[in-house]
Image: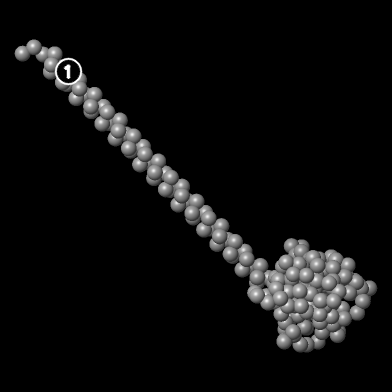
Amino acid sequence: MNKVLMSSMVGKVVKINRGGPEARTGLLLSSGDDYFVLQTKEEGVLYIAFQHVKSITENAKQGIDFESEGSESLVWSSAGDFTSMLGELKHQWVTINRGGPEKIEGVLEDANGDYITLILKEEVIRLASYHVKSVAVSVKKKEEEKEENKAEDSGESSNSKQSSSENKSNSNNSGNFKNSKNSNSDNKRNLNRYYYEIEALDF
């Protein structure tokens, strides 16, 4: 496979490999010097290295069935080569290879021509770059992060409302105290006036 061939198929629905965990059907989005970008139902955006592709199939007459959700909203790397593309995915949760014993997930910490570095909980994993067949930014992980952020925002909003309610309650209590104080002061003045009027009377 080469860039000239893959570039000529951009915009077409193709099937990558005939079977196995790395077989995928999707819309070819773009091509670099040694990799291409495929839109799939499973991963969304999938980066695949040329050297691990055994076959590419397209149906010249009827096409291949593929329901695309629209590539207009998708964002993908347009780096010139596979290593540079990996560099643009640093610090994101990625899935390396799509199935079988070679599948691995983690945060992409670093990437160079020799190996990539993944962080998985307390483990630091270094994987030879040659054995990286495909890379996808995990959609599930993104959704989990969005849900966590949504929950945090909801919690902050709830705390803000509670604080506002407490402040309002304290303000009302303060107002009631002031009203009570003013009322007591008025009663005291009225009582003093009453005694003054009594003393003024000459019995």
Where is residue 174? Give x, y as percent. Answer: 36, 39
State whether residue 39 appears in this view. Answer: no
Residue in view at x 21 percent, y 24 percent: 190
Where is residue 129? Give x, y as percent. Answer: 82, 78
User: Does residue 8 appear to the left or right of 182 in the view shown?
Assistant: right
Quick one: 119 or 92, which is closer to the camera? 119
Residue in view at x 65 percent, y 70 percent: 141
User: Does residue 180 appear to the left or right of 67 in the view shown?
Assistant: left
The chosen color scheme is: one colour
Q: In terms of image quadrants, where is residue 187? A: top left
Residue in view at x 52 percent, y 58 percent: 155
Secondary structure of the residue carrying tag 1 is helix
Where is residue 3? Give x, y as percent. Answer: 92, 73
In which quadrant will I find the N terminus? bottom right
Q: In terms of image quadrants, where is residue 58? A: bottom right
State whether residue 198 appears in this view. Answer: yes
Residue 178 versus residue 155 in the image, above or below:
above
Count of marks overlaid on the render: 1
Give, as a three-letter code, the residue at label 1.
Answer: Tyr
Q: Which residue is mark 1?
A: 196
Where is residue 104? Give x, y as percent. Answer: 71, 80
Q: Residue furthest right?
A: 4
